Image: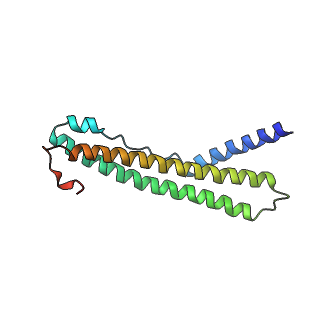
Amino acid sequence: MLLRASLGLFALSALYSVALAESCGSPPIAPALASAPEIRQKSPAEAAAAKHDAFVEIKNWQADLKTYRACLTNVSNDARRQVSNLDPNKDADKIAGLQQQGAAATHQYDRTVDMEERVVNEFHAAQAAYCGRSDVDRSSCPK
């Protein structure tokens, strides 16, 4: 019986993961940035262009992330709203599935936050490499 219930929950979680993917799509793909060593090796003009391009790409990606995260939040909130309207005695399986769906959306949201933090840290490392050079215009560097 426990095995059957576990298989049922697994099947429901797979269905809700698919539903989540269909409703919100795939997470936006993070931009590929020049690394700090690559920034140091480029000519001053190439390094400036790489830093500027990375900044623009990150801002565009963050806008896409905002839209994606709003969808995930809506999925999670909708699941919670549906659970609150169900009878725990009669709809236990449906409640478990909706809770799984909400948890999957929250997990995916958290993954995007971790990815954003990693990308921003990579950008800051590249920016520090750029700003550490003596042959570039440092007017755009943090003070």
The quarter holding residue 14 reads top right
Return the x and y of residue 89 as percentages of the image width and height. Answer: 85, 58
Q: Residue at x 21, y 54 (%)?
A: 140
**Number of numbered callouts drawn:** 0
Identity of the residue furthest to the left in this view: 135
Return the x and y of residue 122 as percentages of the image width and height. Answer: 35, 44
Q: Is residue 132 above or below residue 73?
A: above
Q: Residue at x 73, y 64 (%)?
A: 84
For the N terminus, which image quadrant? Answer: top right
Q: Residue at x 22, y 44 (%)?
A: 130
Q: Is residue 38 left or right of residue 139?
A: right
Q: Is residue 62 above or below residue 41?
A: below
The quarter holding residue 87 reads bottom right
Return the x and y of residue 86 as percentages of the image width and height. Answer: 78, 62
Q: Is residue 60 left or right of residue 43?
A: right
For the C terminus, which image quadrant? Answer: bottom left
Q: Residue at x 24, y 39 (%)?
A: 39
Viewer-proximal residue among 127 and 57: 127
Color theme of the render:
rainbow
Q: Is residue 89 left or right of residue 50?
A: right
Viewer-proximal residue among 28 and 104: 104
Return the x and y of residue 116 as percentages of the image width and height. Answer: 43, 49
